[in-house]
Image (tube, grey):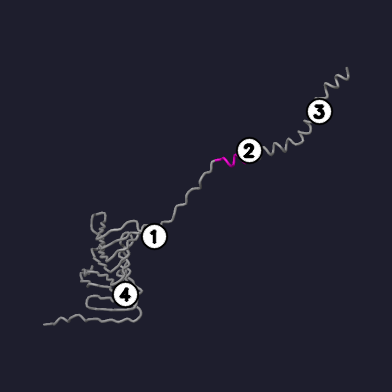
Amino acid sequence: MKAALALLYRPWRSALRAWDQVSIYLPIVLMGALALSTYWLVRNSPVFAPPEVPKAARHEVDYFMRKFTIKSFDEAGTLRSEIKGLEGLHYADTDTLEIDQPRILSISDTGRRVTSTSRRGLSNGDGSEVQLFGDARVVREPVVGVDGELVPRMEFSGEFLHAFVNEERVKSHLPVVLTRGLDQFSGDTLTYNNVTGIAELKGRVKGVMVPKASVAKP
């Protein structure tokens, strides 16, 4: 009887001994399986693209015009500026207009008219700042001042002029000729402010002033 029982329990003892040996390595097997499952999840998880960084605008022409006229009006419908040219190239990144043979008319709040011309020009978006290259001229037409006196015609001419229309300023780092009525001045550089009425010429400065004709007394 004992021999039979021994034969019956022998397979169970072998199974228990085998389970004891396997259980020693079970944690390692489970950790390996967990690592494999984590790797699989990472490989098969959807990848979200990073937000796109807006690209900087390139200095390229976004539109062009030929034999064009651009007019700007104020809220009351009064003409404030007019830009004409044979060809215009607009750059979006700087909002500037490069003009071939520009003719730019600007009218101030008081009605003062200023005309700018050159072989080539570069204007900002609203025409309030203009750079003129080659045979550049800025002409302010004669007007009657607040005191009732006639303000004579004034002209600036040179190979380069930088006009700030709204601020009524003109400057240049190149030689300029300034003509006011019959008087004429020239210099190597120019800074002019119409609000203050001050013109600053530097370098080789020359000037010719024509005296007003005397009025004969009876």
Q: Which residue is label 4 attached to?
A: 199
- Quarter of the image with the C terminus is bottom left
207 up-or-down from 46: above or below: below
The span from disc 3 to disc 2 (Cα, nearest Å) is 33 Å
Specify few, some or many for label 2: CA neighbours under 10 Å numbering under 14, 14-19, or 20 or more: few
Q: Which residue is label 1 attached to?
A: 59
Q: Amino acid at mark 1?
A: His
Q: Main secondary structure of the magenta part?
A: helix
The span from disc 4 to disc 1 (Cα, nearest Å) is 35 Å
| Label whose residue precedes the other's in the sequence (3 or 2) | 3
Expressed as whole percent of the image width and height from the top left, the position of residue 122 reads 32, 65
Give the residue drawn at x 81%, y 25%. Answer: 11
Q: Which is more foreground, mark 1 or mark 3? A: 3
Q: Which residue is label 2 attached to?
A: 37
Q: Which is more foreground, mark 3 or mark 2? A: 3
The span from disc 2 to disc 4 (Cα, nearest Å) is 82 Å
Residue 139 found in image quarter: bottom left
Dot 3: what SS? helix
Q: Which residue is label 3 attached to?
A: 14
Q: Spot the residue most to the right.
A: 2
Q: Are marks 3 and 2 in contact (CB under 8 Å)?
A: no
| Label whose residue precedes the other's in the sequence (1 or 3) | 3
Range drawn in magenta: 36-45
Q: Which is more foreground, mark 3 or mark 4? A: 3
Given residues 3 and 157, the one toward you in this image is 3
Dot 2: what SS? helix
Dot 4: what SS? strand
